[in-house]
Image (cartoon, rainbow, N blue to C red):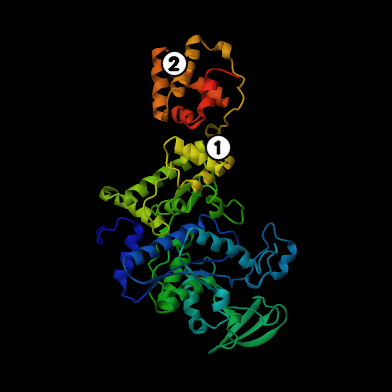
Amino acid sequence: MKEEEPKHWADKYADEIVKRKQKEEYIVESGITPSGIVHVGNFREILTQEFVYKALLDKGVKAIYQYFWDDYDRFRKVPIGVPSEWEKYIGIPISKTPDPWGCHDSYAEHFQEPVIREMQELVIEVSFKHASKEYPAGTFVEMVKKALENTSLIKNILDKYRAEPLEEGWLPVRVYCEECGKDTTKAKYLGNYELEYECVCGHKAVLDFSKKPGNAKLPWRVDWPMRWAFYDVDFESSGKDHKAAGGSWDTGVLIARQVFEHEPPIGPMYEFVNVKGQKEKMSSSKGNVVTVTELLRVYEPEVVRYLYTAKINKAFDISFDADLLNTYNYFDEARKKYYSVENSADENEARRYFFSRIGEHGYVELPQFSVCVNAIQIALGDVEKAKKILKKTGHAYEHADERLKLAWNWVQDYAPEQFKFTVKEEMPDVMLSEWGEEVKELLRDTADFIETGTRAGDEIQQFIYNKAKEKEIPLKTAFMVFYQLLLGKSRGPRLGPFLASLDKEFVVKRLRLEE
């Protein structure tokens, strides 16, 4: 690939980052407030940063992908499904709010743990930082002081985009009360490191946040650009909500430059991720979210990554219906192009697989997902039996275990009815008397053909096609008869390969209409 003409957007941004500034080590950052379920839409940011980080490493420079948990934000409200008594925790950090479900040490950790696990399953190389650790450790003390010293400047920047100006006496800091632990305080900056505050609980005090740094936290609109400056972040993409006119990106850029005297990172906007068939935007509060864990029930980790290599300025749909089969086909093609020595015309697709790939490995032949769907149904969910069916029908089978398991999950949970079938062990209740003698001859001829040799699926398919033409049987009728005999349905998987995958003795007996 020519460096001056990157074929994938991640390479383009990696080039911009390196040309913009020469550094020993580049910082790619992402993050979220873990106050709800992190869904597949949130993962667009996570994986966008992952691909740019990977592109930087591929250029031969050092880089870190840093994921920042904003887990020192306040518990804002009691969501649906949480006991009403959790109202007493409103105002304290979510990292100190108990887990209402009782399975984690805090409210924040309840939502962090699944994301960490999903990142591991997608093999995302990331280092974690926690606001709940950095603020109490005093990491940002000098930055908090700088923000307070520039209160009027920050207020003017934020007011520029507000319908109503911030209240008189507003400060770019939230003070957590030393008595009740909540941020229900009104504060006044005394200069240097001191804040005088009064809490609704009645507690009054002067706080030296250089000695008790965990009690003073910047609000998110100030905290975000502060971290760009503190960590010298080079790249951080964000969604349409942050990029709206006057949104957190616009104010962050101004605060970074004018207050913290630092250039903001390269930060493109990414479009939304949708679940096909879902009309509303995903939202944790609405409960209409789909997680990566759900995706991994039917998609291989590399295929999940592949989905997110699409152009970031275009929305895309994640499908659980029949379009899932197309996604697997596109991924398999990209994989072949990556390992092909003649992939110059399809370099972007090959590069998409580069970012999708997990680990260092050579090309491994895999059966199509649709083939796995048929094999695992014939085997009634038994992976080992399904692998024998794949081997028998000439398909790759040695590395098919995971794909077969996922195909079975898809059949059980999502597959449209036309893709589902069960081979009938007993003769279905079909109207044999309505079939003409030509149809019965076709069945017997096919039985003889299969019995007298080892037949490939395409060979059987062509035989049935030729015989039906010869006997002037409409092809639709001819094929339908086979499906009715074997599945009790009028449609099914591609007939020739399907017949080849079944036990020969069983097929011959059924086609001869023997009970």
Return the disc, 2 or 1, that comes first in the chain's sequence: 1
15 relative to 73 in the view: left or right: left
Q: Position of residue 361 (x, y in %)?
A: 38, 56
Q: What residue is shown at x 37% (from left), y 74% (from top)?
A: 25
Q: What's under tag 1, amino acid-wise? A: Ala
Instruction: Find numbered disc 2 in the image and state the secondary structure of the residue it sits on.
Output: loop
Query: For the N terminus, which image quadrant?
Result: bottom left
Q: What residue is shown at x 54% (from left), y 46% (from top)?
A: 405
Q: What's under tag 2, amino acid-wise? A: Pro
User: Disc count in the image?
Assistant: 2
Mark 1 sits on what residue? 379
Q: Quadrant of residue 291?
A: bottom right
Q: For residue 474, which numbered disc appears in the image?
A: 2
Q: Position of residue 378 (x, y in %)?
A: 54, 34
- Other residues around mark 1 within 10 Å, as few (<14) / some (14–19) / many (≥20): some
The Cα atoms of the two marked residues, 2 and 1, are separated by: 31 Å
Residue 490 visible, this orientation: no
Q: What residue is shown at x 46% (from left), y 23% (from top)?
A: 451
Front residue of 138/271: it is: 138
